[in-house]
Structures are given as C-alpha cells and as structure tokens.
Image: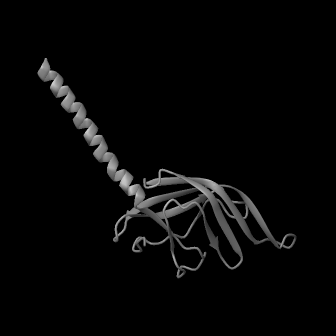
C-alpha cells in the first residue's frame, strides 16, 4: 500500500513539473514577441517602429491619419492576440465637410507569428476591425516583413 502511495505522489509531482516546464516557454515567448509597424501608410521605405504590447500608435499618410489609443491586449505571444481600445481618424472628406475627424471603439487582431532570425517572434499580420467610419472595415496595417528583426 505504501508503494502505491509513493507511485501516486511521484506521478502527481511529475505531472506538475511537466505543466510548469510547458508553461515556461509560452511565458518566455510572450516577452519576446514583437510587431513591427510602418507609421507612414503607403511608404514602405519609412522607418519601422517595433512594439511589444503597444498601448498606442499612429498611422499617417499625406491626407489622413488614424491614432490608436488605450489598447488592451489579450493573448499576446500566442498565435493570435486581440486588442480593444479607441481610435481617432482624421482626414479629407467631401465638398460639404472638407476635413473631419471621427473616433470610436476599435478591435485589432495580431496573428501569424513567425520566428525572427535575431530571436523571438514577430507578428506578420495586424488587422483593424470596426475602425471609425472613414476607414473600410476590416483593413490591414502594414507590418514589417519577417526578415526584419526586433531591435
């Protein structure tokens, strides 16, 4: 009977150890996961800004801009990370309203993490859902190619 109790305790300790070891790489991956964003729309030669858990960033072009603020991420470092927050878009309108701004709630989805040559992971896709009305929904944010690594 004592032998059986020892086997059960050993099995429980072994399972707990395996669970800890499997969870450690996921936590480490979350710390080493980045996203590279081109802040200037339609200018792929612009400098890339790298973020981990970005709380906010802006995208600009010659006639419009959109600013993402108060982003709260869940599942950062997993295959898909989701953020909710606010966005403010400003740009040229039509004849009745030549320039205007709109703001509202927004959801972002980062996905397709790839392994960087410099180590860590880099999300290869960022999609914006439910942006302010002047932007089509959904739209892709220009992100850095996998050949670029985080700083």
Residue 116 picture location, percent across and down = 36, 68
Instruction: In the rendered view, tell whether residue 8 sits above or below residue 86.
Output: above
- Front residue of 57/6: it is 6
Residue 28 picture location, percent across and down = 36, 55
Taking the image as shown, residue 129 lies to the left or right of residue 112, namely: right
Quarter where residue 38 is shown: bottom right
Residue 58 picture location, percent across and down = 62, 69
Instruction: In the rendered view, tell whether residue 130 sits above or below residue 2.
Output: below
User: Residue at the location (87% across, 70% down)?
Assistant: 96
Instruction: In the rendered view, tell whether residue 18 sits above or below residue 7.
Output: below
Residue 141 picture location, percent across and down = 57, 67
User: Residue at the location (20% across, 26% down)?
Assistant: 8
User: Residue at the location (34% across, 67% down)?
Assistant: 119
Q: If the image is split into quadrants, where does the C terminus sit?
A: bottom left
Residue found at the far bottom of this picture: 45
User: Residue at the location (62% across, 71% down)?
Assistant: 59
Q: If the image is split into quadrants, where does the N terminus sit?
A: top left
Taking the image as shown, residue 76 lies to the left or right of residue 140, namely: left
């Amino acid at each position: 009977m004592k032998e059986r109790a020892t086997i059960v305790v050993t099995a429980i300790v072994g399972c707990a150890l395996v669970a800890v070891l499997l969870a450690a790489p996921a936590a480490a991956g979350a710390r080493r996961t980045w996203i590279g964003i081109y802040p200037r729309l339609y200018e792929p030669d612009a400098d890339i800004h790298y973020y981990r858990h970005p709380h906010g960033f802006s995208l600009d072009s010659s006639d419009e801009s959109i600013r993402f603020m108060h982003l709260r991420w869940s599942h950062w470092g997993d295959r898909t990370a989701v953020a909710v927050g606010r966005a403010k878009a400003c740009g040229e309108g039509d004849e009745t309203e030549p320039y205007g701004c709109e703001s509202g709630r927004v959801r972002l989805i980062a996905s397709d993490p790839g392994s960087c040559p410099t180590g860590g992971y880099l999300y290869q896709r960022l999609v914006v859902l439910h942006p302010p009305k002047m932007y089509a929904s959904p739209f892709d944010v220009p992100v850095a190619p996998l050949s670029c690594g985080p700083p």
